[in-house]
Amino acid sequence: MQTAAYTGSSTIEIREIEPTEPAAGEVRIRVAYVGLCGTDLHIIHGNMDARVETPLTFGHEMSGTIDAVGSGVTGWSVGDAVTVMPLDWDGTCPACLAGNTHICQNLNFIGIDSPGALQELWNVPAETLVRIPAGTALDAAALVEPVAVAVHDVRRSELLPGQKAVVIGGGPIGVLIATVARHFGGEVAVIELDPQRRAQIEALGFTTIDPRETDQVAWVEQWTGGAGADVVFEVSGAAAAVLGATDLAKVRGTIVVVAIHPTPREINLQRVFWRELRLLGARVYQRVDFETAIELIADGVIPTELMITRVVPLAETRAAFDDLEAGRAMKILVDVAAR
């Protein structure tokens, strides 16, 4: 079978490997679609080289069907449509014992710390499976993981109906956060530099701001009657965005750091002090976020057809990343079985 593997120095190789039978407690998934994301970009840029072992078959946004069931696995059958919550925690560290298993201090993030979904047949622990309801298309279901990220981010923010939220960065996760926040009753504006992305976001009914043409602080103050935003989501990963985020939040407002920043960033702690701002990290998700994400996709809340720019075969994985980085796509899926 074929896999796409990161081999270091921004190189992705398509490799032939032999599939293996699922071990006890595992299932083997015939992978249908894999979504490419910003975390994967960090991997191929070498930002995670201290963490990953190469060659790494990566990918963690996916959908597929069960191909084989290992011994001791119950409740799952060959042919079941599934996605994977790619978190494997130890259950014994202080974070796990405190109930925060999703951010286990020894977390195995499947697809980063161990082999991921960019392979035709993929063995995973059965407890990571999440069922895809009948009638949900497998291409749409490949978006469950990033939607779960957005659900978790919005839940962490404690955004209330009627409150105003600013999303800095209009990439896939930013758009999904905006969509989830609006569904939960928030009023949302998105700050985005790229004109093509702004047009796509506006087509979804959101107000956008180009910070090169509009004073974003003045705009937010006018929008909020001088108060500032209740919640600011920093999704861009840009140093300037982190520094400027504190200027957008109201007194006792919340800033949620969503983006993965490869290096430490400067932040205006004077503003944090002066306005008693709350600064939150939001990392990955919990099972409830996955379950909510599946409901949102099944109910048509998530504009999956607009989110998925195109589908490519496994051989075009590297070129697809080039398009993502250049802003030529919102979300690209890999059809793992396509040739």
Image (spheres, helix red, strand yellow):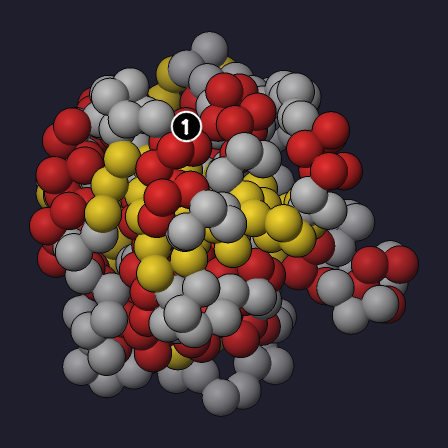
Query: Is 149 in front, or is 234?
Result: 234
Classify the position of the N terminus by image quarter.
Answer: top left
Q: Which residue is pictured at 54% across the width and 87% down the height?
A: 74
Name above or below for residue 2 compared with residue 163.
above
Left or right of residue 5, residue 317 in this image: left
Q: Position of residue 4 (x, y in %)?
A: 35, 33
Q: Position of residue 156 (x, y in %)?
A: 59, 61
Residue 1 makes an appearance in the image? no
Q: Secondary structure at mark 1?
A: helix
Residue occupied by mark 1:
41
Residue 159 makes an appearance in the image? yes
Q: Amino acid at mark 1?
A: Leu
Residue that extends furthest to the bottom in the rendered view of this protein? 75
Query: Is 167 in front, or is 78?
Result: 167
Q: Which residue is pictured at 80% across the width and 64% down the height?
A: 96
Classify the position of the C terminus by image quarter.
Answer: top left
